């Protein structure tokens, strides 16, 4: 492979790059051209890769076509960032000149059967990583846009949709993937919107953005959210970044104008106090927090059920700056919601300056078009110093029940899943060291909610032998935040037992990150 400008072709003996886009011509043009692009001085730039299996041909003029598409997106992002108060920030691109991107051309070691649409991204990513290991100066950031030419010969059926895994997103190239086809109508125009819009939507994910919807009162002027269904409106009608997407990009590595050594290093935030109210037809959320890494922006999403991955296209959202050193406040008018019925998950996201994000979820619901925010609250928990586990029915090796007492969400109690499949119910019991007055108990989940405790029984005891049922409840399916369960009446007790009788997703196992009492 060629290290200079990273424009070489790896391990392939057939001609895959046309003369117009040959390495020599591109180098010669780059050597005599200055770059005036607004973001050319960004210290980090998106890695754009053209990956070609050894039995597939590249699509003619891919460098020019893809350069135009990405430069247009770069400017569109800057306009939106400016509107949202961040200035004309955008993602950096490694440019040969003001109209041509340095695209890393990688010839795959194998045929397309090794890189199927479903399940093939790992094999592609492994070769991309190997390429950059051999060409380290070519890697400009942690963010990759990997484009693969279509495996189909019919331009009316290019293939599967683009997708994203972490900071690497995948898109396809085909003969009509050209910015000039956006908005022309007909099948060619529609597919240009779907595939170019899909590429830019997935690029948004690769730059850390989540799904969301344009708030209702803003939609008449700002149109469709790119990270909502903007992949079906891009180039046809107004498509914009929402405030939360802009705030996310403000903390993305390739938007940064400063160099730092801790990009995407582990970071966490905890809400130490939280209050919620419904005033003047607005949901008011305010609180204080602590953090292990500085936070630049805080965002909130309101997502109607169903929740979870790819169920959040309808999440309305807001962004704010920190008040002082440790406080935040959101005002979320109901006029910006599209549906005032059913169950909602409110997710508060802390956007760390190093690009990491901490997200804490809270459940609430609407009753007669009014939000019931009684669960959106925090309590001061009793100290767990001196507490211990009395017993548990089972645990996966390395995931003991004692993990629920360490106040560390990265460690969990997990019943067996890799070997013996112990069915529900599952339990653990706790010795609080002395008699305590307990008004309620609190549960905190890890991010992966498959198997999180759903229906639970809560017992108390003064001797850890005889147990009295004091509460049966269903826990909310949320991650990160404390799920508070008020008892029917305060109890004086030294021992508590938690019994899980079912889990979210109907798994045979259960798990929990942290447990507390108040």
Image (spheres, helix red, strand yellow):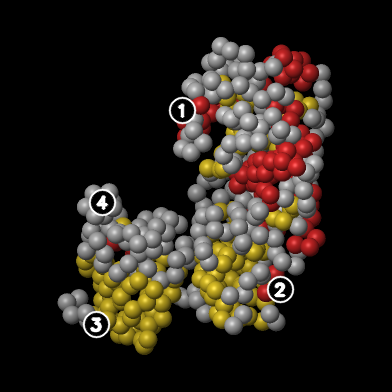
From the image, state whether disc 2 or disc 4 is nearer to you: 2
Q: Are circles 3 and 1 on residues that touch, CB within 8 Å?
A: no
Residue found at x 50% / y 49%: 266
Q: Secondary structure at mark 4?
A: loop
Name the N-terminal-most of marks 2 and 4. Answer: 2
- Residue ID for mark 3: 468
**Residue density around tag 4, few if under 14, some if 14–19, many if 20 or more, within 10 Å:** few
Q: Is residue 442 above or below residue 349?
A: below
From the image, state whether disc 4 or disc 1 is nearer to you: 1
Name the N-terminal-most of marks 4 and 3. Answer: 4
Q: Is residue 503 above or below residue 473?
A: above
Residue found at x 53% / y 44%: 166
From the image, state whether disc 3 or disc 1 is nearer to you: 1
Name the N-terminal-most of marks 4 and 1. Answer: 1
How far apart, in angstroms, are the residues tagged by discs 2 and 4? Answer: 50 Å
From the image, state whether disc 3 or disc 2 is nearer to you: 2
How far apart, in angstroms, are the residues tagged by discs 3 and 2? Answer: 47 Å
Q: Position of residue 293 (x, y in %)?
A: 56, 53
How far apart, in angstroms, are the residues tagged by discs 3 and 1? Answer: 59 Å
Q: Which mark is residue 397?
A: 4
- Residue ID for mark 1: 114
Q: Position of residue 430 (x, y in %)?
A: 27, 71
């Amino acid at each position: 492979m060629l290290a200079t400008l990273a424009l070489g072709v790896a391990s392939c003996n057939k001609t895959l790059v046309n003369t117009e886009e040959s390495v020599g011509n591109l180098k010669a043009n780059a050597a005599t051209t200055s770059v005036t692009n607004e973001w050319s001085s960004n210290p980090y730039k998106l890695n754009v890769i053209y990956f070609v299996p050894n039995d597939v041909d590249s699509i003619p003029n891919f460098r020019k076509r893809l350069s135009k598409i990405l430069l247009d997106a770069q400017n569109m992002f800057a306009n939106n960032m400016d509107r949202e108060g961040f200035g004309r920030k955008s993602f950096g691109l490694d440019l040969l000149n003001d109209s041509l991107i340095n695209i890393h051309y990688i010839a795959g070691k194998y045929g397309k059967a090794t890189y199927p649409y479903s399940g093939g991204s790992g094999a592609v990513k492994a070769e991309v990583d190997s390429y950059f290991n051999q060409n380290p100066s070519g890697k400009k950031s942690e963010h990759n846009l990997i484009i693969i030419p279509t495996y189909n010969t019919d331009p009316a059926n290019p293939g599967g949709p683009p997708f994203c895994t972490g900071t690497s997103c995948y898109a396809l190239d085909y003969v009509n993937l050209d910015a000039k086809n956006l908005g022309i109508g007909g099948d060619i125009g529609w597919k240009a919107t779907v595939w170019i819009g899909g590429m830019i939507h997935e690029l948004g994910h690769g730059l850390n953005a989540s799904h969301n919807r344009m708030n209702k009162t803003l939609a008449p002027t700002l149109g469709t959210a790119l990270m909502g269904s903007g992949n079906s409106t891009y180039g046809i009608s107004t498509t914009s970044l929402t405030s939360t997407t802009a705030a996310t990009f403000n903390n993305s590595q390739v938007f940064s104008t400063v160099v730092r050594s801790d990009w995407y290093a582990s970071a966490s935030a905890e809400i130490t106090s939280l209050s919620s109210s419904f005033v003047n037809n607005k949901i008011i959320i305010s609180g204080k927090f602590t953090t292990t890494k500085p936070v630049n922006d805080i965002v909130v999403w309101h997502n109607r059920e169903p929740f979870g991955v790819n169920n959040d296209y309808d999440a309305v959202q807001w962004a704010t700056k920190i008040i002082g050193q440790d406080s935040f406040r959101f005002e979320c008018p109901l006029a910006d919601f599209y549906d005032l019925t059913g169950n909602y998950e409110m997710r508060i996201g802390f956007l760390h300056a190093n690009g990491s994000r901490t997200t804490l979820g809270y459940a609430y619901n609407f009753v007669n078009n009014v939000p019931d925010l009684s669960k959106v609250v925090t309590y001061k928990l009793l100290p767990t110093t001196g507490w211990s586990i009395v017993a548990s029915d089972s645990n996966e090796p390395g995931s003991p029940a004692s993990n629920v007492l360490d106040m560390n969400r990265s460690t969990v109690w997990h019943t067996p899943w890799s070997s013996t499949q112990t069915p529900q119910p599952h339990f653990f019991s706790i010795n609080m060291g002395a008699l305590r007055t307990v008004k309620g108990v609190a549960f905190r989940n890890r991010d992966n909610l498959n198997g999180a405790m759903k229906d639970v029984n809560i017992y108390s005891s003064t001797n850890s032998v005889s147990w009295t049922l004091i509460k049966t409840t269903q826990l909310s399916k949320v991650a990160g935040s404390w799920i508070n369960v008020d008892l029917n009446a305060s109890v004086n007790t030294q021992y508590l037992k938690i019994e899980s009788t079912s889990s979210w997703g109907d798994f045979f196992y259960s798990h929990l990150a942290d447990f507390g009492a108040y």
